[in-house]
Amino acid sequence: MAVAAPSFPDNMDPKQRAQHQLERLQETLNRAYRSVPFYQTRFKEKKIDPLNVGSLDDLAQLPFTERRHLAENYPYGLFAVPLRDIVRIHTAPGEGHAPSVSGYTTQDLALWNNIVARALAAAGVNANDIMQIFLDPGLASWGRGYKDGAEALEASVIPLTALSLEKQQMVLKDYKTSVVVTTPSSAEELCQGLYAKGINPNDLALRTIIFAGEPVSQEERRTIADKLHVDTWVHFGLSEVPGPAIAFECAAHDGLHVSEDHFYPEIVHPETGKPVGPGEEGELVLTTLTTRAFPLIRFRTGDRMSFIEEPCSCGRTLCRVNWHKDRTDNIVVIRGVKVHHAQVMTYISKALGFTPTCCRLLVGKRGDRVGLEVWLGMDDTIFSDEIKELERVVETVENALAQELGITARVRLSEGKVECSDPGRREVAP
Amino acid sequence: MQAEQISIFIENKAGRLAEVARILSESKVNIRALSLADTSDFGVLRLIVNHTSRAKDVLKDNGFTVRRTTVAAVEVLDQPGGLLAVLDLLNGAGINIEYMYAYANPPGGNAVMIFRFDRMEDAIELLKKNNMRILEAEELSGL
Amino acid sequence: MLQIRNLKCYYGGIRALSGVSLSVSRGELVALIGANGAGKSTLLQAICGLSSSWEGEILFDGKSLAGLKPPAIVARGVSMVPEGRLIFPPLSVLDNLKLGAYLRYRQRDHVGVSQDLEKILDLFPVLRERSKQNAGTLSGGEQQMLAVGRSLMANPKFLLLDEPSMGLAPLVVRKIFDTLVQLRETGLTILIVEQNAQAALEIADRGYVLETGRMVLAGEASQLLADKEVKRAYLGKDYSKFYEGRG
Ligand SMILES: Nc1ncnc2c1ncn2[C@@H]1O[C@H](COP(=O)(O)OP(=O)(O)OP(=O)(O)O)[C@@H](O)[C@H]1O
Ligand SMILES: [Mg+2]
């Protein structure tokens, strides 16, 4: 039986935690430097030896790891242990042609159980609960994370299956589900579906909804909470390290606590890469402290966050962040699935046989269903003065994207340049 | 023997057509003929103008995607069956019409139709052989 | 109780420790494992004030040990059982033990010393049997017990041991380690350096793995015992034939 690196008490004295974080950070850097040529090369290029990192603040000297690096080291280039020690391999959509692949040792899997269990426990999930996981297939690896974490708390789990919305509703009602793990968009659908069927929320055992995959606005939350008579909890995770619950809400519902004994968070200015001032917004950068197979050092998440300086009323001393809807990168999150601008461009080029000048990704809505909307900038190559030719382009690209991304995509041809000035803004298509 | 047309991509939203007209009029370009083909989302505006190159340049400068296409401007007798005669002729030769539209205020009483065929050369040869009048580019834009 | 941050130690121009951080909480038994020359002894010597030049931070009970001489550090409650035992063979077992309380005699704590002496002789009955014998006539295991006993005579809060199992038969190692567990239960905090990773991790709460002057791993002892990397490198199992290398 593998044993995971332990979490420290949620209310540990921050000074003491900082000591442990420093120890874990140095160990991680030493292991990564020793075992992963990518990190060794990058550190050497910058003339940085991990031993220069003598304090947590020194971490800021090290270069960032970006999503493209994961694709560039496809498939196993960033693994820090021999393949023999890897027991699970996950794939997340990457940036560019190659997906990003992450590996797990038995300890890593045990670690994930603990981290997810900790986050679920903070939401009051316990052995009396029946937890239904309702996520898009694109988030299957998170589905497993939640299943294992909930089982560790001895809750009864209805794992992620490819059931229709209708069947999910039947299960929700008949199996007396008390906790649903889902994305805000899917929750909305579920909610509308229940109302459409005339199912009264009071007839359900449902009391908790856990939102994974994408940030949610206060109004969206309130709407769902009011309609379904539930408490809602937000979890933050990364698809690159299938960690659905790196940061989680406590009963105070005031920001998310970061599992900082396992992930060291920094928030930096997206352009300069320098740390932001207290309470200022910036890009979340994470460094793994305890994962073995797949250490990530200063990974730019693209998620926009800000630290909350005040201590939390719940008594946890784990640092807190606000998760903002906009992003700092060219990624759009559709139903929790991250869609990369570069990757969409690659798919479009492949489908059309040439590379169009530009495209812009937005969140589109068709009825209740949220999907991807792609604004394809018209250029001389795409343009034809015959409508049927243009319609063929739309159809070709829509089909290719649906196939490659596994989510519905709608393509709109736009006049000229459609590059957005502020790539991270989460835009909902008009 | 062929006339020149410019095609412009526009989104199907208010004011785009007017914007094109404004840009052209500011550059002293006159629109001789116009057709708009559209779907719910977008449209293709086809124009015959008096200064094709200038029109293309100013529209491009204003961020539009523009293309020059050759078309045939065919005089159609202003009498019943005038257009039908042209269409029958082409149909008989297996030539397809991609699109067609009418020319505004043609000189001399007869109608002028702008055609885009899938086989431009063949079509023009055929029409000429059958004594149909095809307007020259200069003739058309200078009108 | 002990917090080390970013410790660097040099022998002349050679760096034996490259920025090591480690901590031990009150009442914990922590094992530090690593191959020959990793820098384990160097780390212990730095804590005890036996190393002339180190950089970084060593805090004991929240106060820095920088610049303190060994007796001052012993006076704070830190006592070490050095590598190779370093007992005095011509002296009797009893005298060897009393030497360990040298500082306390100077503080005229005679009552305390004789109480502790009794406790230690209870802990190691074999030492009581041999108390009059010259220490040089003891077996290796008995000498190690004597070395531990002598360190305890300083009435430490924190005991450091450098490879206590070295050169001893497994049964004797077991016996000494059992004693360490007993001591931990009385509230003593212990940091043990070992090449015998298996034995050390079996009794420890937590462990650290040192590799050529750098810490590469730390965790619960049970976690490290189950760790494939630790097994391959330190637990003497031959995993090399399964090693597949990077993909
Ligand atoms: N007095 C010294 N002068 C020079 N170099 C030294 C001295 N003592 C130790 N070293 C060197 O420092 C490094 C660490 O030595 P150290 O004795 O701390 O290792 P260790 O982990 O205790 O090894 P072992 O398990 O063999 O006892 C080694 O490379 C060693 O050669
Ligand atoms: Mg040594």
Image (spheres, coloured by chain):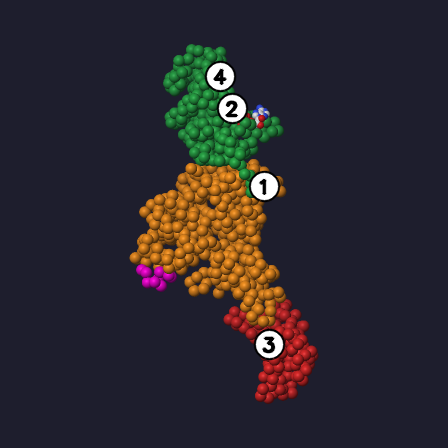
Chain colours: A orange, B red, C green
Q: Is residue A45 left or right of residue A365?
A: right
Residue C87 included in the magenta stretch of the image:
no
Q: Nearer the viewer, mark 4 or mark 2?
A: 4
Residue beneath disc 1? A37
Q: Do discs 1 and 2 belong to a common subunit?
A: no
Q: Do discs 3 and 2 belong to a common subunit?
A: no
Q: Provide the chain ID for the residue under circle 4.
A: C
Work out whether C130 lies above or below A143.
above
Work out whether A83 lies above or below C198.
below
Specify start and end residues of the magenta stretch as a single range. A191-200
- The x, y position of residue A142, in whole percent, is 44, 49
Determine whether the residue tagged by mark 4 lies in a helix, strand or loop.
Answer: loop
At label 2, the amino acid type is Lys
Q: Quadrant of ligand 1?
A: top right
Q: Residue at x 51, y 58 (%)?
A: A403
**Callout 1 touching callout 4 (CB < 8 Å):** no
**Callout 4 touching callout 2 (CB < 8 Å):** no
Residue B97, disc: 3
Q: Provide the chain ID for the residue under circle 3.
A: B
**Callout 4 touching callout 3 (CB < 8 Å):** no
